[in-house]
Amino acid sequence: MITVIVATSMTLLLAAAALCVGSALKPASVPNRVVALDLLLVVVILGIGVLTFQTASGLFVNLLVVLSLIGFVGTIVVARFVERRGA
């Protein structure tokens, strides 16, 4: 049963990642690309979370925290850049 749940979750996350990449590659404004890349990072974090659930190991929890902090700080930096630039 868990195998089906993990396979379904990974399939849906793969579809979400494909949509995020498509949105990031589409010609748009800088804030739209930042949101798409931030969402892609969230999808990757969720994929690692599903992998952690499947293996029943706490080995990847530190990686999840670090990736979350990197995403947060990166979003703040880009938001300040866009605000100063006026885009």
Image (cartoon, helix red, strand yellow):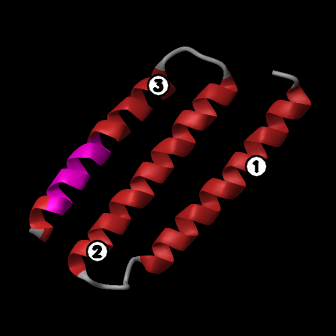
The C terminus, quarter of image: top right
The N terminus, quarter of image: bottom left
Q: Nearer the viewer, mark 2 or mark 1?
A: 2
Disc 2 marks a residue whose amino acid type is: Phe
Q: Main secondary structure of the magenta part?
A: helix
Q: Which residue is mark 2?
A: 53
Q: Which mark is residue 76?
A: 1
Q: Which residue is mark 3?
A: 23
Q: Which residue is drawn at the image coordinates 62% and 60% (left, top)?
A: 70
Disc 3 marks a residue whose amino acid type is: Ser
The percent coordinates of residue 14 (x first, y second) are: 28, 43
The earlier-in-sequence mark between 2 and 3 is 3
The percent coordinates of residue 50 (x first, y second) are: 30, 65
Q: Cβ–Cβ below 8 Å for labels 2 and 1?
A: no
Q: Nearer the viewer, residue 67 or 43?
A: 43
Q: Which mark is residue 57?
A: none
Q: Label 1 crowding class (10 Å Cα cut-off): few <14, some 14-19, many 20+?
A: few
Q: Residue furthest front?
A: 1
Q: Label 2 crowding class (10 Å Cα cut-off): few <14, some 14-19, many 20+?
A: some
Disc 1 marks a residue whose amino acid type is: Ile
Q: Which residue is drawn at the image coordinates 60% and 36% (left, top)?
A: 35
Q: Nearer the viewer, residue 13 or 4?
A: 4
Q: Which residue is drawn at the image coordinates 76% and 49% (left, top)?
A: 76
Which stretch is magenta?
5-14
The earlier-in-sequence mark between 2 and 1 is 2
The percent coordinates of residue 71 (x first, y second) are: 61, 55
Q: Which element carries disc 2, helix, strand or loop? A: helix
- Count the numbered circles shown: 3
